[in-house]
Image (cartoon, grey):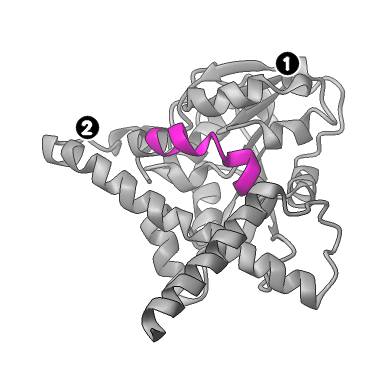
């Protein structure tokens, strides 16, 4: 899904299920609030931009600390954005369709930049992080939250078939090259994941006015437009990527049930909803049918 058109069509359909299946399992309130603490959203007059804001789940954490009228949401998916606009607590936010690698706002405009669960779909992550540097004021902070490459070979193969799962050192290198200083990081994960390094949240401070020192060289390296062959392959890539992404839902549900049996939920407020229970039931029925077909 690491191309804008592929991500667009992926979210055209995923937006229907996103708040029901994805956030409650992979990006919980505890993870969100822990990550947002890095951004120091502790001043009443801060202007905040949420890039790749999607259905507004992360934005809802921001507006618990910052007035909604001071928050700008940017996303390339009108379908995801429609879900966010329908949420009462986000009614006073500013919404604009836009691209994380070419944000349609002025330079040195915001005090804080936040982006959660968006970098996975950026064709050029370094360019996106240079844009994060550009849009905030000197002394402003940019917070980025994203996944880390899975450790097991099977999960890593499924993940990389779906979208970008960077290594920790890549995140740090992108931030350093963009010009950020005082870079800090923490690891975040849902309670059902046993390993600590599931996702990373990192924040950096802008040191000088204007664009990133790396901006011009990044501009010169922008990817070319897709060829006709690549355009024709897009539906196939969307299908394969979506199927790979879909595998994470049953994997997460099984992990959730296993963790619920073995240990307390460690502060995550989420309980499985009816849609997730129906998915588990569907998995069990499929396993029974497959077993019957094999053994009969």
Instruction: Please determine whether, in this image, residue 2 is positioned above or below residue 100.
Output: below
Which residue corresponds to mark 1? 91
Q: Earlier in the sequence, mark 1 or mark 2?
A: 1
Q: Is residue 220 left or right of residue 130?
A: left
Mark 2 burial class by Cα count in 10 Å: few <14, some 14-19, many 20+: few
Viewer-nearest residue: 207 or 82: 82
Q: Position of residue 115 (x, y in %)?
A: 61, 38
- What residue is drawn where x is 87% and y is 33%? 42
Q: Main secondary structure of the magenta part?
A: helix
The stretch of residues the image draws in magenta is: 9-21
Instruction: Please determine whether, in this image, residue 206 is positioned above or below residue 258.
Output: above
Which residue corresponds to mark 2? 225
The verdict on residue 15 being magenta is: yes
Q: Residue furthest front?
A: 296
Q: Quadrant of residue 52?
A: top right
- What residue is drawn where x is 64% and y is 48%? 275
Give the position of the C terminus as an image quadrant.
bottom left
- What residue is drawn where x is 48% and y is 32%? 100
How far is disc 1 from disc 2 in space, using C-alphas?
A: 36 Å
Q: Is residue 48 visible?
A: yes
Q: Position of residue 125 (x, y in %)?
A: 44, 45
Q: Is residue 13 left or right of residue 57?
A: left
The verdict on residue 291 being magenta is: no
Q: Which mark is residue 170?
A: none
- What residue is drawn where x is 81% and y is 34%? 41
Disc 2 element:
loop
Q: Position of residue 192 (x, y in %)?
A: 71, 66
Viewer-nearest residue: 164 or 136: 164
Disc 1 element:
loop
Mark 1 burial class by Cα count in 10 Å: few <14, some 14-19, many 20+: few
């Amino acid at each position: 899904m690491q191309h804008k058109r592929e991500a667009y069509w992926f979210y055209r359909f995923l937006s229907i299920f996103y708040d029901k299946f994805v956030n409650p399992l992979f990006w919980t309130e505890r993870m969100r609030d822990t990550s947002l603490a890095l951004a120091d959203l502790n001043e009443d007059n801060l202007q905040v931009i949420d890039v790749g804001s999607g259905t507004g789940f992360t934005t809802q954490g921001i507006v618990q600390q910052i007035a909604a009228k001071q928050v700008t949401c940017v996303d390339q998916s009108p379908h995801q954005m429609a879900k966010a606009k329908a949420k009462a607590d986000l009614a006073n936010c500013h919404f604009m369709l836009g691209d994380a690698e070419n944000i349609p706002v002025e330079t040195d405009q915001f005090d804080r930049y936040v982006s959660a669960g968006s970098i996975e779909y950026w064709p050029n992550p370094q360019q996106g992080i240079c844009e994060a540097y550009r849009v905030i004021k000197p002394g402003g902070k940019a917070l980025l939250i994203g996944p880390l490459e899975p450790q097991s070979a099977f999960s890593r193969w499924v993940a990389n078939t779906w979208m970008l799962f960077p290594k920790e050192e890549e995140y740090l290198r992108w931030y350093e090259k963009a010009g950020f200083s005082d870079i800090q990081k923490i690891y975040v994960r849902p309670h059902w994941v046993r390993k600590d390094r599931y996702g990373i949240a990192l924040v950096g401070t802008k040191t000088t006015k204007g664009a990133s020192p790396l901006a011009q060289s990044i501009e010169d390296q922008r990817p070319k437009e897709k060829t006709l062959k690549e355009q024709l392959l897009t539906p196939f890539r969307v299908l394969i990527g979506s199927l790979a992404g879909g595998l994470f839902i049953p994997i997460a549900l099984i992990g959730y049930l296993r963790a619920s049996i073995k240990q307390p939920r460690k502060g995550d407020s989420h309980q499985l909803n009816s849609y997730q229970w129906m998915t588990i039931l569907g998995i069990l029925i499929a396993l029974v049918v497959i077993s019957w077909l094999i053994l009969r």
